[in-house]
Amino acid sequence: MDSKQLARFLGVMLLASGVVIGLARLLYLTPTKPPVGPVSTIQTANSARPQAASNSVLAVGANTSVALKRGPVRWNLHSQEPAFALFSEWYQNYSLAANLAEKAALESVGIRLARDRRTVLAGLVRTDPETALREAVPTGVRRALPQSVKELLETRISGRGELTVMAALPEPGKEAAVVPVFRTATIGNKSYEAYVYGQRLGEPTRRDLPLNGIAVDQLLAVSFFAFLNTSSSIFSPLFRVVSDRLKR
């Protein structure tokens, strides 16, 4: 990293620090106002969104009405990909379920949506690892999920390891069948197909490197940030700000 890149990176880190302080003030210094008016229900909330009703997989039964209350962690993921949006909406309803019986009834739906989400996420790791990292389930949300659903989520990866860059020269006429540049990441005795973005695209093979990211089976989306948990519900806005600034 030359002096210009270093100065640019330090400037972005200063900006990031300001964003973290601002988020902390909002989270811990702003008083919470009590809710006003009657408590709505999931049926009422869903009836206000007619387009989502046709894709609804969230109702436990025709006569079921679950009173809304504050869940353990709020997670409002506004994704253009239906697999992510539906899973996020399912989580909101699961976290608001009034009792264990309602949670159990919703669990089978969550398993199916988690499988669909996993398939889409695996493709996204290959094609757009930066977005895959943004779509990762926040830590607080994971803790609130049943084990059967949690097992279908991405795996958090964090440790020191080797990021290897390799190149291949295809035979004439077979260019489309060969990936010209590919990467592997090794952490301990575990190896992954690694996918990177941003400034990491220009990095050579590096050893004893802090690596942070998410894995779906053998596919690893490697974060540009060595230590920051980019899928945290608190730090994801900061991740987007710093990432956008580094692209300029």
Image (spheres, rainbow, N blue to C red):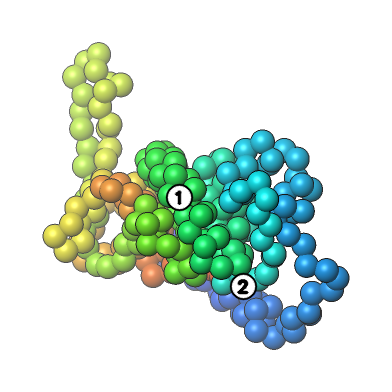
In the displayed image of the protein, which residue is found farthest to the front?
Answer: 63
- Residue 226 image offset from top left, x and y in percent: 37, 66
Name the one closer to the observer, 158 or 66: 66
In the displayed image of the protein, which residue is found farthest to the top?
Answer: 173
Q: In this view, does 128 lie to the left or right of 98?
A: left
Label whose residue precedes the other's in the sequence (1 or 2): 2
Q: Is residue 39 visible?
A: yes
How far is disc 1 from disc 2 in space, using C-alphas?
39 Å
Q: Residue 108 carries which label?
A: 1
Q: How crowded is mark 1: few (under 14 residues within 10 Å), some or many (20 or more)?
A: few
Query: Please, what is the three-letter code of the amino acid marked with disc 2?
Result: Val
Q: Which residue is drawn at 24% across and 18% down?
A: 174
Q: Residue at x 72, y 52 (%)?
A: 43
Q: Which residue is drawn at 60% across and 59% down?
A: 92
Q: Image quarter for residue 41?
A: bottom right
- The total number of labels drawn is 2
Name the one closer to the observer, 206 or 230: 230
Q: Image quarter for residue 178?
A: top left
The residue mark sitting in front, 1 or 2, is 1
Q: Is residue 134 visible?
A: no
Q: In this view, does 235 lie to the left or right of 36?
A: left
Query: Please, what is the three-letter code of the amino acid marked with disc 1?
Result: Ser
Q: Which mark is residue 19?
A: 2
